[in-house]
Amino acid sequence: MLERVGCLAAGATPATPLIAARGLGFAAGGRRLIADVDLAIAPGRRTVVMGANGAGKSLLLRLLHGLLTPDAGQVLWQGHALDAAARRRQAMVFQRPVMLRRSVQANLGFALRVQGLGRAERRAREREALARGPDMLFLDEPTVSLDPASALAIETLLDEAHGAGVGIVMVTHDRAQARRIGDDVLFLHAGRVVETGPVAQVLDTPRSEPAQAWMEGRIFVGDTLLPDS
């Protein structure tokens, strides 16, 4: 069971979004990959990020977590600019997790040492198998290559995290999984947020053309809907 150890930043209120983006943008190789993204996620909410391949889902997670620096707009944590202290209240699980060639305990100890914890506290948390106790957890398709039993185990852990008050932002292509673990959907198309709302609303009655096409198995390229074959 995850333990919550977070707290509100100075000046933040319970109504302040845990994380928000304002006019967020990012370009690389002469291409605009993320453009004009505005979002606000309340503490403890579970947001699933969906969209076609190449829509910018993984890139958005990296921007929100501070692994990449936007060239436009900003990311806010509890109403303040994202900084190193804020990032310590977050954790991210990549689609292809990186593990060091050492024991599980040593991997835990390394992550905790990076967070600045002293030896005594690191040892205590290693014994508890509690690595971060984050306020926000970013996950980039963590179950994409897993068998159903393993995927269910991950979802159970996410349920436990949510029960402990952890906010979750997770990329998935699996609509059934989105219904099981999500409160809200954030749908991306060509680097832009084209639709947001409660999971059932977006999945059952999408309003944007890109989301409608994706739900029906059709494809948008840029602003063009490819004809059915």
Image: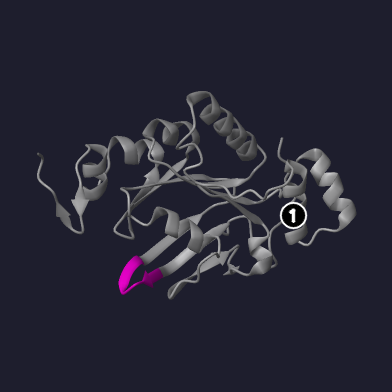
Q: Which residue is mark 1?
A: 110
Report x, y in % for residue 120. 90, 52
In this rendered view, identify the residue nearer to me: 24 or 103.
103
Circle 1: element type: helix
| Residue 106 rendering spot, x and y as whole percentages | 77, 48
- Label 1: few (<14), some (14–19) or many (≥20) C-alpha neighbours in 10 Å: some
Residue 30 is inside the magenta segment: yes
Image-based side of 49 in relation to 165, left or right: left
Would you place residue 45 above or below residue 80 in this image? above
Which span of residues is magenta-colored? 25-34
Image-quadrant location for residue 105: top right
- What main secondary structure does the magenta stretch of the protein show? strand
Q: Quadrant of the N terminus?
A: top right
Q: Closer to the camera, 181 or 94?
A: 94
Q: Residue furthest right?
A: 120
Can see residue 12?
no
- Colour option used: one colour
Q: Position of residue 122 (x, y in %)?
A: 83, 51
- Magenta stretch: includes residue 182: no
The quarter of the image holding the C terminus is top left
**What residue sits 77% from the left and 58% below the top?**
113
The residue lying furthest to the top in this view is: 149
Image spot of residue 93 (x, y percent): 57, 48
Identify residue type, mark 1: Phe
What residue is at 64 percent from the left and 43 percent from the top? 165
Q: Is residue 227 visible?
A: yes
Query: On the image, which quarter does residue 224 sit in?
Result: bottom left
Judged from this view, the residue extending furthest toward the front is: 101
